[in-house]
Amino acid sequence: MRRSTRSQKIDTVFVLIIFCVFAISVLMVLMLGANIYQNVTDMTREGHDERLVLSYIWTKVRNDDESGKILIGDIDGVPALCFDEDIGGILYRTSIYHYNGWVYELFSEKGLGLAPENGTQILKTDDLKFEALDFGMIRISSGNASLLVSPRSGSTGTLPDAFFGEEVFIG
């Protein structure tokens, strides 16, 4: 009879050990799945933020290009996409730029010499770059996404085939 009680104890301990191994395995799989989900979510959010920044700028270009005065300038040494407009005989400038991890917008009378921190924070992003190209085109890049815009005033001549199909958006 002692042997059967001892055998039952060994069986019980063995079952408990198997249950613990199973529970630990399930917990590890759940933790791994949660980590993978978090990484995918972060990558998706980052790509979305890049596209959102470019979509915002594309909208500004299309809305503010009435006078055809879009150019790449700077605010206290920080590169900016600038929109000049005349309101009531006074020249104003809207500037969009990247400063301290944020996309800023600054609307002011042209030539006031305001600092980058005087703008309004719009969107958080890692980087934002502006590049003047041939034919008046401007390439705007944020992370891995880029936008190719052609201000109405900058379109002179025929665009080469190399410009088509290489960007996320074409404005």
Image (cartoon, rainbow, N blue to C red):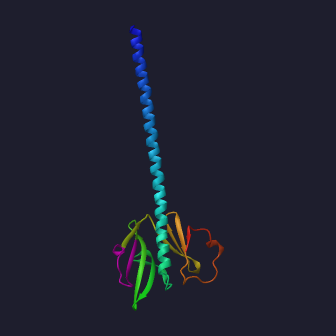
Q: Nearer the viewer, residue 167 or 18?
A: 18
Taking the spot 44% from the left edge, 50% from the top edge, the residue there is 38
Give yes or no for residue 52 being in the magenta stretch: no
Tell me the magenta residue range: 104-119
- Percent coordinates x, y for residue 73 in the rendering: 45, 79
Query: Viewed as shown, does residue 161 lie left or right of 107?
Result: right
In this picture, is 38 found above or below 86? above
Q: Nearer the viewer, residue 79 or 14?
A: 14
Residue 137 figure quarter: bottom right
Task: Tell me, yes or no, whether the highlighted magenta stretch contains residue 117.
Answer: yes
Q: Position of residue 89 (x, y in %)?
A: 40, 92
Query: Looking at the picture, how far across and down is residue 146, in whole percent?
Result: 53, 68
Residue 30 spot, x, y in % from top left: 44, 41
Question: Where does the C terminus fall, quadrant-wise?
Answer: bottom right
Is 144 displayed left or right of 89 in the figure? right
* Rendered residue at 52%/65% (across/down): 145
Q: Residue furthest bottom?
A: 89
